[in-house]
Amino acid sequence: MGKRIIASLAIVLTGALLGCQEPHNIRMRFAAMVPGSPEQLVGVDANHRILLCDPETQDVIRVLGSHRGPVRELRVSPEGDYVATVGTAGDCRVWNTASAAAAPLVASVPGGGDDRGAVAFLDDGAHIACGGTGVVDVISLRDGTLVRRIPDRRQDILYEGSDFQALAKTLKEARVLSLDARPGGRHLLVGTDCGAMEIDYLRCRIMWRQKERVGQVATLVRYLPDGEQFVVQDDSGRLTLYAGHKSVWSTRPGESGPGGRGLVGVTAAEFTNDSAYLAALGSDGRFRVLRLSDQKVVQELAPGKLDTAGLALSPGRASVWVGSQGNVERFTRIALPQEMTTPKLTIE
């Protein structure tokens, strides 16, 4: 009888202790680096809370807030002042990383939903672009006012010298799947289920549109840090690099330069600041690093259950963090190839 009582007390005590601890299996979606001093990681937990974490200890520094439902996309502003999240309910929330008391700016993504809706911070640091279906909105980060809707016939003066009808026809009913803003410019790269295009968001003008094949679905669009090049991925998994609006090279799943196996359905991508490497997560759950000069995959591994929605590249290019699915840690840390961190010698 005494042994049974002791065993029962042990079970109760163990349950009480576990109840005070965080669950063993932590699920963290997304991962992005918030620049600053010090740098921080941001991700979304299973309760749709947006968490700022210490990269080294992975301790939660602050809970920015939460969505009422799942988060579809997460982006960080270039200076790290803001984090934007897009929910599957069609709402965009912009969180101030510097102020714990600041309420999020809440905007409606036009036509956003489960399978569409994207966001990008403009290079001026004062606006954000949101797109869902048919239009892209430019919104002020200061007060949440709608600065520009593209296309919008009520602002005819913006279309002087351009074709409103062409822009309206191109975006009509198109689902926006990915957005990015050109560094140092006024262009938006828009990926839709009708292909990719580049828009001058000040003059509301189409600068470039994909012409490879009709009805092409652009699932991911990203500018390189130099602002002069960008990549587009279609629904077949083909990744194409453009420079001067001309295709430079293209890789399909299973293909790459000598010695590499290629990228597979890129779901998240980050470029190094010198535009030399692309770190990418694939729909197959694997992490890869592509050297852009010869399209060779210089690293490929599957370190466990990874969340494929986002990755955070360390400023020193020594490692990346990826959200963990069912692992003990919030983020999985992956060491990058030595060639990415070794300084290149120059002979004068």
Image (cartoon, rainbow, N blue to C red):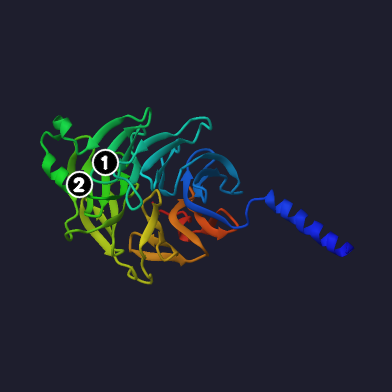
Q: Is residue 68 visible?
A: yes
The CA span between labels 2 and 1 is: 9 Å
Compared across the picture, whether 29 is left or right of 180 comes to right
Q: Which mark is residue 136?
A: 1
Q: Nearer the viewer, residue 319 or 191?
A: 191
| Residue 7 location, quadrant | bottom right
Q: Label 1 neighbourhood size at 10 Å, few (<14), some (14-19), many (20+)?
A: many
Q: Label 2 neighbourhood size at 10 Å, few (<14), some (14-19), many (20+)?
A: many
Name the residue rendered at 17%, 48% in the picture: 170
On the image, the x and y values in percent for residue 53 come to 56, 45
On the image, the x and y values in percent for residue 19 come to 68, 51
Name the residue rendered at 34%, 59% in the picture: 292
Quadrant in which the N terminus appears: bottom right
Q: Nearer the viewer, residue 84 or 318?
A: 84
Compared across the picture, whether 232 is left or right of 99 comes to left
Secondary structure of the residue carrying numbered label 2:
helix
Name the residue rendered at 29%, 63% in the picture: 238
Q: Amino acid at mark 1?
A: Val
Q: Are marks 2 and 1 in contact (CB under 8 Å)?
A: yes
Which residue position is annotated with label 2? 171
On the image, the x and y values in percent for residue 334 come to 52, 59
Q: Amino acid at mark 2?
A: Leu
